[in-house]
Amino acid sequence: MKHRIFSHKRIKGVETAIRRAEEGTSGEVVVLVVPSSSEYVGLHALTAAFGWGAAALALLIRAERGHWTPPWQEALLLPLVAALVGALVPYWGWLKRHLIPRRILAARVHESAFRGFMALGMTETRDRTGLLIYLSLLEQRVEIIADRGIHGAVPKGFWDEQVSAVVRGIQAGDPVQGLEGALAAVGQKLRERFPARPEDRNELQDRVHFGHPKL
């Protein structure tokens, strides 16, 4: 999966920004982009049930008032069509994002980001200095997960600032710009706190990963 925003040229630009962020530091930075953090299957079932119920209720009310009594075939077909339309509605990303409570979106993104962190081997660096920048495009949410070697070694609020920068880019339709800015800031902070040592080597691939990696 490669989102249309991420052209080959722009992906290369982000990967260059990753390499620059790692220059002069023992930190290992990885970027993971997913279309969404969950299928939200329950939402499709809910909107299908709502469509079916609304159509059935409308038919019942009209029949009770004597306005229209449809043949039984139509009385069965119309709610089924409404249910199908209802099930398809959440495929419209903007609407899905607004139908799901924010706490559920945040929880699903966090869970998916943590799974990605583990699946990409971010805990396997020598000094536990792996850092994942995770973008979930449907939810327009970003998670930055830093391994224990660096998580608490930066000023309070620093990670939140970088998350906000990338989110603004997603909302503006240009996550790459937000990513490159966050990577530059992260690289500067890593060089200050975790300067490279002579024996350091590149432990994780300097690339943008797309889709959900398997554990």
Image (cartoon, rainbow, N blue to C red):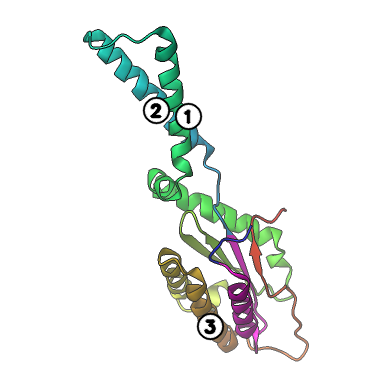
Q: Position of residue 3 (x, y in %)?
A: 57, 61
* Mark 2 or mark 3: whose residue is earlier in sequence: 2
Per the image, label 3 sits on a secondary structure element best described as helix
* Mark 3 or mark 1: whose residue is earlier in sequence: 1
Q: Which mark is residue 184?
A: 3
Q: Indicate yes or no whether the magenta region holds residue 136.
A: no
Q: The disc labelled 1 sits on which kind of residue?
A: Leu
Q: The disc labelled 3 sits on which kind of residue?
A: Ala
Q: Are the two marked residues, 1 and 2, in contact with CB atoms closer than 8 angstroms?
A: yes
Q: Is 78 rendered above or below residue 27? A: above
Q: Indicate yes or no whether the magenta region holds residue 15.
A: yes
Q: The disc labelled 2 sits on which kind of residue?
A: Gly
| Quarter-of-image position of residue 47 | top left
| Quarter-of-image position of residue 10 | bottom right
The quarter in which the N terminus is drawn is: bottom right
Q: Position of residue 196 (x, y in %)?
A: 68, 88
Distance, label 3 to label 1, CA atoms, is 47 Å
Q: Are the two marked residues, 2 and 3, in contact with CB atoms closer than 8 angstroms?
A: no
